Every structure is written in structure tokens, then in C-alpha cells.
Amino acid sequence: MAIAAQKQCTLEQPEESPVSHKLCEMFWTLGPAYARWAESRLRREGLSPQRIRLMAFLRKSGPSKMRALRNELGVTATSVTALVDSLQKEGMVTRRPDPADRRATLIALTPEAEQQLKAMCGPFKNQVAEIFSGFSAEEQREFLDLLARVRAALVERDILKETSPQ
């Protein structure tokens, strides 16, 4: 929907557009492109950045409710359910009742998933981070600070939940 809106909202001539509009267009273009590029860096078939992020969150946070996973990934309940279903089918996560809330289910990593994460997370992040190699360390820190401000604005508007960035 955002892509369709973006295409319909480009009626202004580029030189007439305010900088904030140009930023919107850049994010609309770069977000999906970056996700595709990151996915292309995965060597093991069947893995995606979202699946790795979900597993890394579980590794860092321990067994978690679906709501926490959804908030961390910034995806819909349907999407996180599909991710968890797929990972469970592959033996990477388990579901178990939450002892503190009998209505809730906790999602936890299996020992196999822990081993896979140890083996692939660092190399994957190194490959994906390569796209920033054209920036100095100082430029990367400045960019990160600016993106943190965008993230904070999204949290303030209840689009993302307050969690520490990865």
C-alpha cells in the first residue's frame, strides 16, 4: 500500500519537492531494496533477515510471547505467526505455555537454533554491513544517530515499540 501511495504521490517536479518529501521517497525506495540486498547475502537457503532477527531476539531475550516478537520485528501478528510456524516446523523454535499467564504461549529457541545462530550471525552481519563500507566510521556513527532519531519518532507515534535497536 505504501508503495502504491508513493507512486501516486510523485506528481510534483523533483526540484519543487520539499526535502522532507525527498526523504520519504528515498525511504520508500531504499527500505525494500535494502531488504532484498540483505536477503541476497544469505548463503543458507530458507533463511531471511526477519527469521534471523527473530531468532537473535529470542537468543538475547529468552523465551518470549508472540506480541514481543511482533513488536521487535515491526510486523503484523499474521507475519510473526507465519515466521514462528515455519521455524517450529524446522525444529528451530518451540512453543510452550507461559507459567505466569496460562492464556499465553512462549516461543523459545531450540539448541539447534542456538548453534546455527552462533555460526551464522556474525558472518551475516559482516556481509550485510559491507554496504556501508563507503562511509567513514564517523559518517556511520552520524548516520546511526540520525536513524535512531527517526526510530524514536516512530516509537513516539506508536508505530514501533520501545526496544533497544539491534
Image: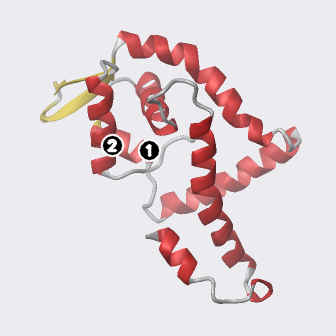
Q: Which residue is mark 1?
A: 73
Q: Earlier in the sequence, mark 1 or mark 2?
A: 1
Any part of residue 119 in sight = yes
Q: Amino acid at mark 1?
A: Leu
Q: Do residues under tags 1 and 2 come within 8 Å of each other at their CB atoms? A: yes
Q: Position of residue 78 (x, y in %)?
A: 27, 49
Q: Amino acid at mark 2?
A: Val
Q: Position of residue 125 (x, y in %)?
A: 64, 29
**Residue at screen point 37% across, 10% down:** 111
Residue at 76% x, 83% y: name it.
14
- Image coordinates for residue 142, horizontal then vertical, percent: 80, 50
Could you say which quadrant of the image residue 94 lies in?
top left
Mark 1 surroundings: few (<14), some (14-19) or many (≥20) residues within 10 A: some
Q: CA distance from mark 1 to mark 2?
A: 8 Å
Residue at the farthest left position: 102
Q: Is residue 116 above or below residue 71?
A: above
Q: Quadrant of the N terminus?
A: bottom left
> Is 105 or 82 nearer to us in this picture?
82
Secondary element type, mark 1: helix
Q: Which mark is residue 80?
A: 2
Q: Would you say 17 lies left or right of 135 here? A: left
